[in-house]
Image: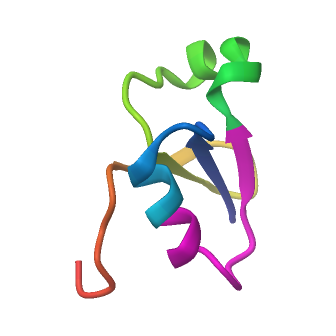
Amino acid sequence: MTLLKFYADWCCPCKVLTTSFKGIEHTPINVDGNPELCQKYGIRSIPTVIALDDDGKEIGRFTGVKTAAA
């Protein structure tokens, strides 16, 4: 499984989520420098995290900041 985390340096919720992702293997994607990937994955809000299976198929996503209990 692969986790893609779409974020921006200027986004406060993205900074909070970055703290939550310490120690979790993921691919950070800055939306300001990757408009093609944002379009490919239909990113409308940040932060957005997308889970891909081993074949690259999307198996889940969430937008915004989630608590550990969520």
Q: Position of residue 39 (x, y in %)?
A: 58, 13
Query: In the image, 66: left or right of 3?
Result: left
Q: Position of residue 14 (x, y in %)?
A: 48, 51
Residue 7 occupies quadrant: top right
In the shown orientation, is residue 67 left or right of residue 20?
left
Name the residue at the left extreme: 70
**The C terminus is located in which quarter?**
bottom left
Return the residue nearer the eye: 8 or 58: 8
Which residue shows up at 47% across the image and 41% down it? 11
Location of the N terminus (image quadrant) = bottom right
Residue at image point 63% right, 27% down: 31
Which span is picked out in magenta? 17-29
Q: At 57% across and 65% down in the image, what residue appears?
A: 18
Looking at the image, can residue 60 be seen?
no
Q: Is residue 19 magenta?
A: yes
Residue 3 image point, x, y percent: 64, 58
Residue 10 vs residue 22: left or right? Answer: left
Q: Residue 65, relative to residue 63: is it above or below?
A: below
Residue at image location 53% in from the left, 48% down from the top: 50
How many callouts does the rendering have? Answer: 0
Q: Is residue 45 located in the magenta-colored stretch of the structure?
A: no
Q: Which colour scheme is used?
A: rainbow
Residue 4 position within the rendered picture, expressed as x and y whole percent measured from the top left: 65, 49
**Residue 16 seen anywhere in this rendered image of the structure:** yes
